[in-house]
């Protein structure tokens, strides 16, 4: 194992809980640098685009409405491809090596966008950056889940979502501060260059964290996996228990069906449908419509342009607070219950926003009430829905196909992201405030999907979840239910 992380010897006794937590938190901090870069890269473009529309002789790229959309969307398309491909890469070469490779793409993409001399170069570099963003979005949750263990998995995987929204908040604040403090025609280049920092930290950090013990066992590298578990668990009993479960799972995979056969089994197909459906659920809440277009929504109420843009910082602050609350909640409440609660409040907020925009006159009261509805939506979205989605993406799929299926599910989520981002402005223009009633109806359907399709995973190890899914959704499940 090529890592500088010290590992315990075979004779070590029980390690203190604080020491183990510090070690695991360090691994999580390194891994979530990818999520921080993800959040910053998706958030900073809103502040950079106005400067990039300036003519080339004034420091910009001369973007028009078409090329502006092309620059903004190229990252999303890259992310869809990156999340899909990284699944194959992480299953073949390991989660840590995948993160290290993605860190290189983060740095190259950030540097490339900051130095881009033309629109084609900018689009290419944004696409490259999107591959890193998408790859990180599917690899980081899986890596954290496999490192953390059953007791810490929920709150630690949820830190991925916290770092995403923190990155977005940093982007909003940075773009606001830089626009006030620096009067430079190349200001947008500085905004984009800052994205190199979390990428560099991720690259350096991967040399100081261990590989995934689950992946090592799947590769037959049992001694390395055991050393890492001794370093990351409090007692020899925990190490023996997890090693036994992982070896049992690896043996079953070795003597069981091949990956191509497994992917056609009934229970795996059911999980694939659930994973794809959850991607639809999270994106068709309309969350990115709110995150990207809050100024447009508020300007429709008569709020000034500057005030509308400043409100995006409120979005970022509420999202961070809600994500912190979500970390607390996922350790205490069932996944299904959290999603059902979150979607119920999301639907309520959308109905209220539609009513405010439809039935109240355009004045300051309408503006403030609309903003309150948006912030209510974001709070329950980021506390109850988003963290559970990323947690489930790290839990649902079998070890033999975890990277591939997680990558495919997250890739679909990025495609749904693009559909909402592209569709929101024309639908808003055509349907007006009725748009939010449309989202509410869609989310009623999402609520029904969660209630009828989603199994509960709380309180189980990854191996126990896999066994439970196979038993619940496998070929013999109907016979078992009948008996």
Image: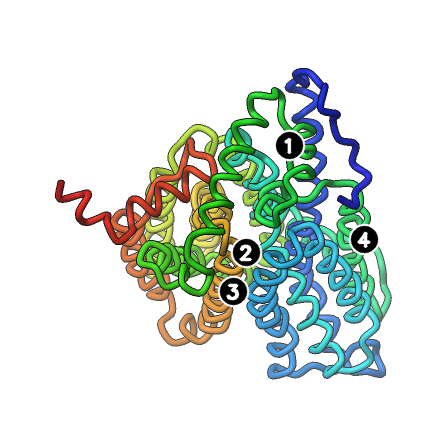
Query: Which quadrant, please, contains the N terminus?
Result: top right
Q: Secondary structure at mark 1?
A: helix
> Which callout, 1 or 4, points to the residue nearer the camera?
1
Residue 302 seen by the camera: no
Image position, residue 295 (x, y; %): 55, 61
Q: Crowding at label 4, few (<14), some or many (≥20) Cα neighbours within 10 Å?
A: some
Query: Which residue is label 3 attached to?
Result: 411
Instruction: Tell me which colouring the rendered structure shows.
Output: rainbow
Earlier along the polypeptide chain: callout 3 or callout 2?
A: 2
Residue furthest front as drawn: 255
Measuring 72% from the left and 43% from the top, which residue is drawn there?
Answer: 30
Residue occupied by mark 1: 229
Distance between the alpha carbons at the discs numbered 3 and 2:
12 Å
Q: Which mark is residue 271?
A: none
Name the residue beneath numbered marker 4.
Answer: 200
**Residue 403, labelled with which disc?**
2
Quadrant of the rendered image containing residue 41: bottom right
Sooner in the amino-acid sequence: mark 1 or mark 4: 4
* Foreground disc of the pair 2, 1: 1
Q: Residues within 10 Å of mark 2 (few under 14, many from 20)?
A: many
Dot in front, 3 or 2: 2
Discs 1, 4 touching: Cβ within 8 Å: no
């Amino acid at each position: 194992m090529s890592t500088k992380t010290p590992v315990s010897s075979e004779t070590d006794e029980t390690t203190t809980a604080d020491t183990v937590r510090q070690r695991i938190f360090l691994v999580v901090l390194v891994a979530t640098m990818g999520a921080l870069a993800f959040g910053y890269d998706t958030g900073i473009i809103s502040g950079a685009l106005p400067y990039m529309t300036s003519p080339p002789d004034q420091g910009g790229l001369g973007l028009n409405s078409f090329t502006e959309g092309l620059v903004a969307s190229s990252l999303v398309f890259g992310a869809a491809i990156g999340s899909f491909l990284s699944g194959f890469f992480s299953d073949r070469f390991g989660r840590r090596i995948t993160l290290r490779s993605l860190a290189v793409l983060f740095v190259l993409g950030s540097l490339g966008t900051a130095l881009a001399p033309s629109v084609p170069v900018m689009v290419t570099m944004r696409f490259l950056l999107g591959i890193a963003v998408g790859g990180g979005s599917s690899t980081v949750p899986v890596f954290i889940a496999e490192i953390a263990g059953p007791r810490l998995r929920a709150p630690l995987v949820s830190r991925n979502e916290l770092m995403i929204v923190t990155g977005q908040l940093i982007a909003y604040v940075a773009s606001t501060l830089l626009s006030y403090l620096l009067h430079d025609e190349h200001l947008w280049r500085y905004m984009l260059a800052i994205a190199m920092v979390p990428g560099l930290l991720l690259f350096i950090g991967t040399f100081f964290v261990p590989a995934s013990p689950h992946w090592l066992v799947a590769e037959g590298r049992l001694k390395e996996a055991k050393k890492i578990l001794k370093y990351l668990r409090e007692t020899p009993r925990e190490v023996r228990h997890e090693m036994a479960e992982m070896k049992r799972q690896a043996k079953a995979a070795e003597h069981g069906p091949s990956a191509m056969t497994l992917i056609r089994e009934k229970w795996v197909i059911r999980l694939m449908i659930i994973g794809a459906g959850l991607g639809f659920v999270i994106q068709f809440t309309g969350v990115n419509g709110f995150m990207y277009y809050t100024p447009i929504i508020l300007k429709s109420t008569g709020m000034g342009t500057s005030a509308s843009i400043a409100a995006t910082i409120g979005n970022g602050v509420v999202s961070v607070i809600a994500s912190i609350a979500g970390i607390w909640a996922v350790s205490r409440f069932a996944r299904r219950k959290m999603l059902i609660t979150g979607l119920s409040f999301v639907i309520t907020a959308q109905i209220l926003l539609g009513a405010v925009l439809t039935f109240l006159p355009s004045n300051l009261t309408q503006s403030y009430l609309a903003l309150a509805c948006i912030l209510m939506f974001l709070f329950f979205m980021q506390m109850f829905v988003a963290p559970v989605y990323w947690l489930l993406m790290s839990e649902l799929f079998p070890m033999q196909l975890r990277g591939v299926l997680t990558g495919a599910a997250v890739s679909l989520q990025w495609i749904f992201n693009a559909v909402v981002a592209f569709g929101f402005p024309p639908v808003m223009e055509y349907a007006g405030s009725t748009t939010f009633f449309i989202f509410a109806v869609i989310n009623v359907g999402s609520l029904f999907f969660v209630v009828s399709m989603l199994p509960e995973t709380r309180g189980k190890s990854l191996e126990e979840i896999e066994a439970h899914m196979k038993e619940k959704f496998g070929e013999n499940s109907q016979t078992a239910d009948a008996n």
